[in-house]
Image: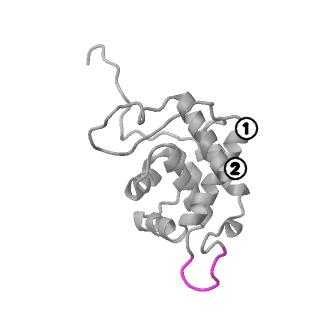
Amino acid sequence: MGRFIEGEDRRQSWLLPTSLDDYVTEDNPVRVVEAFIDELDLSALGFARSEPASAGRPAYDPATLLKLYLYGYLNRVPSSRRLEREAQRNVEVLWLVGRLAPDHKTFALLRRDNGLAIQAACRHFVVLCRQRGLYAGAVAAIDGSKFKAVNNRDRNFTAVKVAKQIEQVDASIVR
């Protein structure tokens, strides 16, 4: 067919690695998410249904759903429906959740029922990252408004102005 690079025939049988672990490298961030969530005490953080029920249909482990939620947070996948798609096609996510594929409603219920517990888990994650020195000392100020901005002296913030404002807030807290 000429001198083009050709792919393999899709109908050809071939052997894949025997486990998903072969696809996820040792330094992949999903391994950090896995280790972090496995060390958390979810019932102490306030997760609903952190202990399995004795009757009825088995539920998803909140730790598994939290792993997927945190993965989505780190990789800018905020939507429940997009997390559902990632759980079906992304090899990292397949490894992380053990080939489970929860639907979008499951994520919506997790967020609804465990909002404060998710915040506490994310707070622990940020503290851990700060302790390990994974965050740079950069300052970022974000304004989420969607209207024409006025860039005058009072509304323009530099690193020095932000530091002074933080000092003022700390002083008012002490007062």
- Amino acid of disc 2: Ala
How far from the left and from the top, in percent, is residue 115? 53, 65
Q: Quadrant of residue 153?
A: top left
Residue topped by disc 1:
132
The answer to whether one can see residue 37 in this image is yes
At mark 1, the secondary structure is: loop
At mark 2, the secondary structure is: helix
Please state which of residues 84 and 167 is positioned toward the viewer in this rendering: 167
Q: Is residue 157 above or below residue 96?
A: above
Please state which of residues 137 and 85 is positioned toward the viewer in this rendering: 137
How far from the left and from the top, in percent, is residue 95? 57, 49
Residue sitting at 31 percent across and 37 percent down?
149
Q: Is residue 162 above or below residue 61?
A: above
In 3D space, how far apart are the residues under numbered discs 2 and 1 (Cα atoms)? 14 Å
Residue sitting at 71 percent across and 59 percent down?
40
Q: Main secondary structure of the magenta part?
A: loop
- Amino acid of disc 1: Arg
Look at the image and give the residue range highlighted in magenta.
Answer: 51-58
Residue topped by disc 2:
35
Taking the image as shown, residue 75 lies to the left or right of residue 53, namely left
Quadrant of the rendering where the N terminus is positioned: top left
Instruction: Confirm whether the magenta stretch covers residue 53.
Output: yes
